[in-house]
Amino acid sequence: GLFGVPELSCPEGFQEAQDKALQESEQLVQKACSTPPGPETVRIFDQLSDALCRVADLADFVKIAHPDFAFREAAEEACRNIGTVVEKLNTDVELCQSLRRLLADEVIISSLDPETRRVAELFMFDFEISGIHLDEEKRKKAVNLNVRILDLCNEFLTAAHLPNKIDKHVLPEHVRYHFTAEGNYLQVAGLHADCPDDLVREAAYKIFLYPEAGQLSRLEELLASRNSLAQLVGYETFAHRALQGTMAKTPGIRHCFINAFIIKIFFRTQKDFEMMTKMKMKLNPQNSKLMPWDHPYYSGVLRAERYNIDPGLYCPFFSLGACMEGLNSLFSQLLGISLYAEETQRGEVWSEDVRKLAVVHETEGLLGYIYCDFFHRPDKPHQDCHFTVRGGRLRENGEYQLPVVVLMLSLPRSTRGAPTLLSPGMMENLFHEMGHAMHSMLGRTRYQHVTGTRCATDFAEVPSILMEYFANDYRVVNQFARHYKTGQPLPKHMVSRLCESKKVCAAADMQLQVFYAALDQIYHGKHPLKMSTTEILKETQEKVYGLPYVPNTAWQLRFSHLVGYGAKYYSYLMSRAVASMVWKQCFAQDPFDRAMGERYRREMLAHGGGKEPILMVEGMLQKSPSVEDFVDALVSDLDHDFETFIMDS
């Protein structure tokens, strides 16, 4: 069966696995309610969480990645059913009382270790944000709102990726062939941001982002429902509810962070837009006004012109095998960890090209498993992701339940004449996702509820973004980047140029991320919203981003991150700021420093979500960073390396 779960040898097995989990959870609920308050209460709650997550997390992956529709459909149904049960448990008064008795007993609480106490508080927080303190009628309303929000999220995500259709005769003939034809219609499934033809990019932007009434009402209902739920359970806005337990903590601190950053990079962004405008004027004198569909393309043209970083020059040095050896070598030196390929059993994987890696520590032994689903296939989502399939925890018998994760990429397959070759971007993404995997492997908490990446959203991306800094350091790259034919190492100047090229128009790229974060902040702020979501988009785009809004477009309807990162899109920027500080202070001098590697594991990776995120950052940096420090760290990443800059000038 999938992942070695015997029931999952066929789609119908999801029903069996689900029934088993629900039966186990019923017994654990009864046990929790009848057990006297103490550490055992927290252990039972965690067992309950584990019983449900073992099916829900696995199904969460299968529903989007399995090539067989029947498996995907069965997994989707299991996710929905378990999600509904979780929402009901979060409003179960008797279950909550068993935890409340524990938290109200000062003698017992003072005797608990910090991790057990935090896990108990996190479980209580789940009850509170679901409205446990409300009367029965309002609790039912909270459950119904949660279920409706779950449905709206799934519907919004699906529609966000659907193509738009247009009569093919509307477009000039030379533009048509860029899009998929369907009778008299053309399907526009994306922004075609890299296309050199300005007219193709403009057409794609205006057609793909044309507002669809159903999606517009879905988004409005989703935002209104989130706000209703937050207010029902006692929060001013959905943002106040979502930011509990994060590094930002409140919308006010998040707002300060975003605004301070806008002010710091304003002039750099304007300079980037001026450079892009000049380039557009040079290549297209008839229409030199910079538009939103121009930013990705002309920033790429400027990078290529200034640094000549044709990905084709780099790919031969980044074979998949070499990159995996590089990761293995880095983890070995830094953390004492090695990756070993393991044979899979029949039915264990969902595609024959999936590889299973055992993660082994030099003294502690086997830490867990990583399934590598690296290659492109039809119907596979075109996104790079890390999935927790099973969380680690200390079992009742004293054994440790090993974590299991999946890394999903969309790499090209090997050909007869060459192995799988990665572009620099693909190589960096591989390092990024492997950062998440190491967090899952090394976040060896006692409780599954806070294992690995089950932590605050604005902290979860720190280990993965930190790995990008390693991927861009010549000392690291030099250990593995070899030409697949000649064995020649990648020259240092090529790595330097690649790193510097990323700083070209980087302020404008970051400003775009700030715009997304600001938009997300307003959508999840005070309701009712003062304007429609499209009017808010127009105002925020022109105020924060700087490029004009295009009439009859609604980019927010394609903003799929509103589902997973609602009120928390700023997290990417904050995580990058922390990763930047950790890199510069701890690893820039020596990326293979074992003592620093051990400190990184001890202070940041080992706790999962079992410790306040800001305390983990303070432990690593050995100081308490301010909002100003976060902003300065991001801005300093935009500065050019003097030596490379002068050499290329």
Image (cartoon, grey):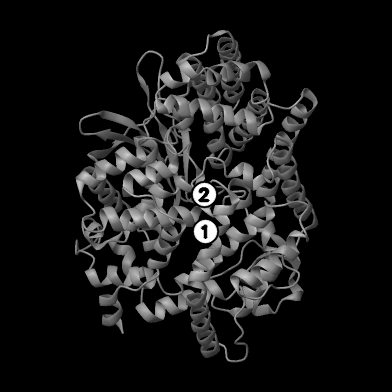
Q: Nearer the viewer, residue 46 or 428?
A: 46
Name the residue at 71% across, 34% down: 147
Name the residue at 77% across, 47% down: 221
Residue 321 position within the rendered picture, expressed as x and y whole percent measured from the top left: 29, 50
Name the residue at 51% across, 44% down: 246
Mark 1, residue position:
257
Left or right placement of residue 243 versus residue 114 in this view: right
Q: CA distance from mark 2 to mark 1?
A: 9 Å
At label 2, which amino acid type do we have?
Ala
Q: Nearer the viewer, residue 422 or 624?
A: 624
For the C terminus, the quadrant is bottom left
Mark 2 or 1, nearer chain start: 2
At label 1, which amino acid type do we have?
Phe
Mark 1: few, some, or many residues within 10 Å (few <14, many ≥20)? many
Residue 181 position within the rendered picture, expressed as x and y whole percent measured from the top left: 68, 65
Seen from this angle, which residue lies furthest front?
106
Tell me which corner region of the image, top left, top right, bottom left or bottom right, holds residue 129: top right
Vertical side of 595 occupied by 541: above or below? below
Q: Secondary structure at mark 1?
A: helix
Mark 2: few, some, or many residues within 10 Å (few <14, many ≥20)? many
What mark, if any, has residue 248 been given in the picture? 2
Residue 16 position within the rendered picture, expressed as x and y whole percent measured from the top left: 59, 19
Q: Nearer the viewer, residue 140 or 288?
A: 140
State if disc 1 and disc 2 touch (CB < 8 Å). yes
Vertical side of 293 occupied by 571: above or below? above
Tell me which corner region of the image, top left, top right, bottom left or bottom right, holds residue 28: top right
Left or right placement of residue 54 versus residue 177 in this view: left
Can see residue 420?
A: no
Vertical side of 537 occupied by 445: above or below? above
Q: Nearer the viewer, residue 551 or 203?
A: 551
